[in-house]
C-alpha cells in the first residue's frame, strides 16, 4: 500500500509542477493524460527544464542525471514513470 501512496504522491507532484509552470510561463496546457505526447502538452523546452529543476528540489532525484541512462520520455505517462522509478 505504501508504494501506491508514494506513486500517487510523485504523480501529484509532477502534475502540479506542469500546471504551475504552464501558468507562470503563460502557456496553455493541454489536458494531461498518460498518453499525451510531451511535445503536444503546450510546454516548451524551457518549461520542461524548470519542471525538472523543481522536481529535483521537491523529490530529491534527477532521473536525467548523467549517471543514469534514462531516455527522454515521449509522453506525460513516460515522464511521470521516470520519476516514479527514480524515487523507488
Image (cartoon, helix red, strand yellow):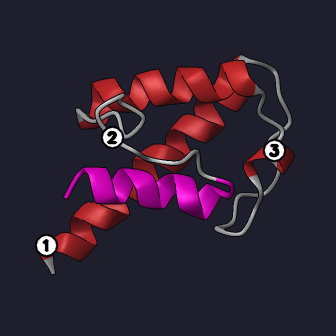
Q: Which residue is mark 1?
A: 2
Q: Name the residue furthest left.
A: 2
Task: Name the front one of labels 2 and 1.
Answer: 2
Task: Name the front one of labels 2 and 3.
Answer: 2
**SS majority, magenta:** helix
Q: CA distance from mark 1 to mark 3?
A: 32 Å
Which mark is drawn over residue 68?
2
Judging depth in this view, the residue of 12 and 70 nearest the camera is: 70
Residue 75 lies, in percent from the top left, at 67, 58
Q: CA distance from mark 2 to mark 3?
A: 23 Å
What residue is drawn where x is 48% and y is 29%? 52
Q: Is residue 79 magenta?
A: yes
What residue is drawn where x is 78% and y is 57%? 31
The residues colored magenta run 74-88
The number of numbered discs placed on residues in the rendered structure image is 3
Which mark is drawn over residue 39?
3
**Pointer 2: residues within 10 angstroms few (<14), some, or many (20+)?**
few
Residue 24 lies, in percent from the top left, at 68, 18
Judging depth in this view, the residue of 82 and 3 nearest the camera is: 82
Quadrant in the picture for the C terminus: bottom left
In the rendered structure, which disc, 2 or 3, sits on the residue that comes first in sequence? 3
In the rendered structure, which disc, 2 or 1, sits on the residue that comes first in sequence? 1
Query: Residue 81 occupies which quadrant of the picture?
Result: bottom left
Identify whether 32 is placed above or below 29: below
For label 2, the SS is loop
Amino acid at each position: 500500500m505504501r508504494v501506491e501512496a508514494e506513486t500517487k504522491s510523485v504523480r501529484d507532484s509532477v502534475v502540479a509542477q506542469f500546471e504551475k509552470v504552464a501558468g507562470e510561463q503563460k502557456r496553455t496546457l493541454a489536458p494531461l493524460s498518460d498518453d499525451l505526447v510531451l511535445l503536444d502538452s503546450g510546454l516548451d523546452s524551457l518549461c520542461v527544464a524548470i519542471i525538472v529543476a523543481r522536481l529535483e528540489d521537491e523529490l530529491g532525484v534527477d532521473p536525467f542525471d548523467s549517471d543514469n541512462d534514462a531516455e527522454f520520455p515521449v509522453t506525460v505517462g513516460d515522464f511521470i514513470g521516470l520519476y516514479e522509478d527514480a524515487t523507488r
